[in-house]
Image (cartoon, grey):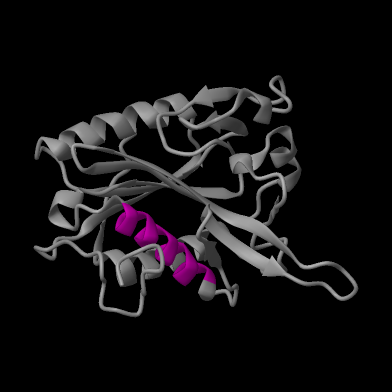
Amino acid sequence: MLDRALNPSASAPFAREDGAAAGWAVSHGLVGYDEAVAAMEARVAAIAEGRAGELVWLLEHPPLYTAGVSAKASDLLEPDRFPVFRSGRGGQFTYHGPGQRVAYVMLDLSGRRRDVRAFVGALEAWLIAALGRFNVSGEVRPDRVGVWVARKAPGAAAREDKIAAIGVKLRRWVSFHGVALNVEPDLSHFSGIVPCGQTEHGVTSLVELGRPVTMDEADAALMAAFREVFGPVAPASPPL
C-alpha cells in the first residue's frame, strides 16, 4: 500500500501519471549549504510554475548542522563545532558532511499523488530498497521518521541505529529537501547534536556496518531503487 509501509515490489507505485522521467543530477565535490538551498528553492519555484522538470540532486556538504522546524535549542550540544543552518524542512537537528549522500528530491506530487504521508513512505521504501542491494535490512518505526538498522552483537544488548534521515517540505505540491544516507561519514560528528531528537538510539553507516561501499556504488543503488518506487530518471545537470 502507498503508506509509510509502501511496498516497493509494486511497479513504480509513486511514478508520474504521465510516465515522464525525473532528472537525476550528481554534484562532485562539496557544495555549500546556503548555495544549495538557494538553487533548490529556485528550481522548486520553476517546477511549480511549469518552467522546469522534476529533479533529484545528489551531493555532499562540508561538515555542518541543520535545524528543522521542530528543532529544540537544547539538542544542539556543541554550537561552535560546525556551522549551524536553520532549515525550512521538517524534523529536528541533523548533521551533513563528507561521506554522507544527500539527495534533494524536487518532485511535483500533483502529477504523482497528493498524499504527504504516502510520499514519506515512498522515500522510506526507496532508501530501504537501496540498502537491500548491500544486504542491509533497513527498517522503519511508526514513531520515528527515517530508516533504522537493528543490531545485535554477541553478548551485547540489542540496539537500533539510524542510517538514513528524511526531512522534506512541500510548496504548491512540489517537494524539496529530501534524504541523507550515511555511506562513510565521520560518525563522531553526530555527537555535537541529538540527531533528530533521539537520545535512545545511535547512528551508523554502510561502512561502519562492514559494507565498504563507495559513493558511486551508493549512487547506483539509489538510482536503481528510485526507479522501482518513483519511476524513470534521465541524466540532468546540477542546478549549480
Q: What percent of the width, then of the height, locates residue 163?
A: 60, 57
Name the residue located 43 percent from the left edge and 38 percent from the top edge.
90
Residue 212 visible in image: no
* Location of residue 190 by image quarter: top right
Q: Is residue 45 left or right of residue 240?
A: left
Q: Is residue 158 left or right of residue 238?
A: right
Residue 178 versus residue 2 in the image, above or below: above
Closest to the observer: 213 or 164?
Answer: 164
Q: What percent of the width, then of the height, locates residue 93?
A: 58, 35
Name the residue located 68 percent from the left edge and 56 percent from the top edge.
204
* Location of residue 211 by image quarter: bottom right
Closest to the observer: 183 or 132?
Answer: 132
Closest to the observer: 137 or 219?
Answer: 137
Q: How many marks?
A: 0
Q: What percent of the width, then of the height, locates residue 54?
A: 22, 48
Label the magenta part by its dominant secondary structure: helix
Q: What percent of the width, then of the height, locates residue 165?
A: 52, 50
Extent of the magenta region: 117-131
Q: Is residue 17 left or right of residue 68?
A: left
* Location of residue 213 by image quarter: bottom right
Looking at the rendering, in which quadrant would you find the C terminus? Answer: top left
Name the residue located 25 percent from the left edge and 78 percent from the top edge.
11
Name the residue located 38 percent from the left edge and 60 percent from the top edge.
121
3 part of magenta stretch: no
Residue 79 visible in image: yes
